[in-house]
Image: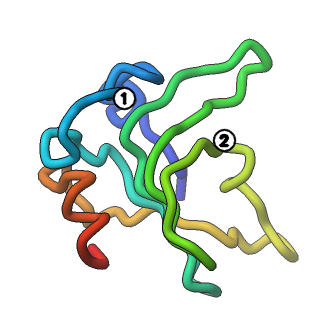
Amino acid sequence: MMLLTKEIIKKLPKLYSQDGKDPKDVPIIAKFFSPYSNWTWYVTEGEQREDGDLEFFGLVRGQETELGYFCLSDLNVKRGGVPLVERDMSFGYTHTLAEAKEKQI
């Protein structure tokens, strides 16, 4: 499974474009999770870096829950050929940052 599709990339707002917006008005574009741990990443914006990697901003839920930056290369890791992070393919574009902050979605 691909972590990103062209459709998701097209929907990504540019980094910093959501600054100052109410969390209930900030859509989550993609949700990534590790089936082997309690880590989840909710992407709200992103863009390609000079080195070709994609940099995201969103809510990260792991040992702590916090807003932060992360890269596609951080998520695209494998152990023994098995991906350690997957994209929630059933996750639509109807959820907001406020929902992710308030509860586990």
Pointer 2 local density, CA inside 10 Å: few below 14, some 14–19, many at least 20? some
Placement of 2 over or under 87, stated as above or below = above
Q: Secondary structure at mark 2?
A: strand
Q: Position of residue 16 (x, y in %)?
A: 43, 22
Q: Residue furthest front?
A: 20
Name the residue rendered at 60%, 20% in the picture.
Answer: 48
Kind of residue indicated by mark 1? Leu
Residue 68 in the figure: left or right of residue 89 = right
Pointer 1 local density, CA inside 10 Å: few below 14, some 14–19, many at least 20? some
* Residue placed most toward the observer, 89 or 68: 68
Residue 58 in the figure: left or right of residue 26 = right
Name the residue rendered at 14%, 48% in the picture.
Answer: 24
Q: Position of residue 70 (x, y in %)?
A: 63, 45
Count all numbered tags in the image, as a single digit: 2
Q: How is the image coloured?
A: rainbow
Q: Secondary structure at mark 1?
A: loop
Q: Position of residue 36 (x, y in %)?
A: 64, 86
- In the rendered image, the quadrant that contains the C terminus is bottom left
The residue at which mark 1 appears reads as 12
Residue 71's disc is 2
Placement of 36 over or under 26, stated as above or below = below
Name the residue rendered at 53%, 59% in the picture.
Answer: 1
Q: Residue furthest top?
A: 50
Kind of residue indicated by mark 2? Cys
Q: Position of residue 90 (x, y in %)?
A: 26, 66
Which of marks 1 and 2 precedes in the sequence? 1
Name the residue rendered at 62%, 31% in the picture.
Answer: 54
Q: Are marks 2 and 1 in contact (CB under 8 Å)?
A: no
